[in-house]
Amino acid sequence: MLSRTADHLYWMARYMERAENIARILDVNHRMSMMPQSRIQEEQAWGATLRIMGLEAAFHQRYAEITPDNVLEFMIFDQDNHSSIRNCLRAARENAHAVRGTLTSELWETTNGTWLKMRDFTPEAFADAGAGEFFEWVKYRSHLSRGVTIGTMLQDEALRFIRIGTFLERADNTARILDVKYQLLLPAGEVEGGAADYYQWSALLRSVSAFEVYRKVYRDLITPARVAELLLLRVDMPRSLARCMKEVYTNLQRVRNAQSAETERQAGELEATLRFGRIDDIVRGGLHNYVIRMLARTQELGNRIADDFLVPVS
């Protein structure tokens, strides 16, 4: 496959997944903002959303203070924010258009239709329809795109690069959510693994569609250590790091080329680290440090994939 084609497929998938992830985070924060809280707590919660995406500095260049309305506008509609939902859906469509002949007609129509609807969506329409309805629409369109991809695309290299992009983006997002929210929710001075507010931790789980999964797996109170275990090490959890890295490694094996041996090895090593990891060891060594290392390794893996398969950045 031409590197330019692989590049467009990879980034089409990443941007669609990113739009869904942002919608998930914003939806949970919006729901939690309906609960009684102080101005400081509100600012911390919305500030955490910006830190998760690495956009805190960019936000402060455009807005004087962190408020729900400012963050929502910045993360949904801001055309200067490359990671706003609007720009993610636009970029997904542009990449899809560049390789339209490689996609099935159903996948192209789904991606194009999502952008056309988003393009006509205004902040006024957002206010009228309600935040919850909009976020559900973004998540639904991402689910639809993923289902159409799996249900209609040939099981060839094109599909493999779409899957690699999807799961690398998802791994990065899950790690960021866990790191920032874990530090925010764990009370100062509390030993990791101690009790914390049920609603706050359930909201974190819901942001990655893991609340029902948690109840099925653990059948007990929600504790920080178990949340971390579920989102890091459970290979049967669809949005966990372990699952994402398993998918990345498996699909890399299907597209290997003459120069990708080291990239494949590093992906396999990362997948094995997560598959055989123990949450007690991770918590004892510090969850934040562990997640930071995972994020660095995931980013390095993405860079190596770009070097081996995609269009070089000029």
Image: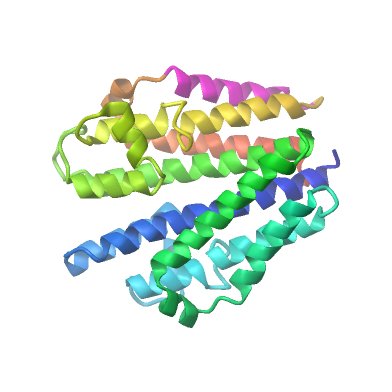
Q: Residue at x 41, y 31 (%)?
A: 232
Q: Is residue 303 above or below residue 141?
A: above
44 vs 148, left or right, is left
Q: How many marks?
A: 0
The residue positioned 29% from the left and 34% from the top of the image is 215
Magenta segment, prevailing SS (helix, strand or loop):
helix
Place of residue 59 in the rendered image (x, y in percent of width and height, measured from the top left)? 44, 68
Q: Residue furthest bottom?
A: 124
In the image shown, does 82 or 96 lie closer to the viewer? 96
| Quadrant showing the N terminus | top right
Taking 290 as reference, is 90 above or below it?
A: below
Location of residue 54 with respect to 168 vertically, above or below: below
- Region of the chain picked out in magenta, as a range: 259-276
Residue appearing at x 73%, y 59% in the figure: 109
How are the colours assigned in the image?
rainbow
Between 142 and 50, which is closer to the camera in this rendering? Answer: 142
The residue at 47%/82% (across/down) is 124
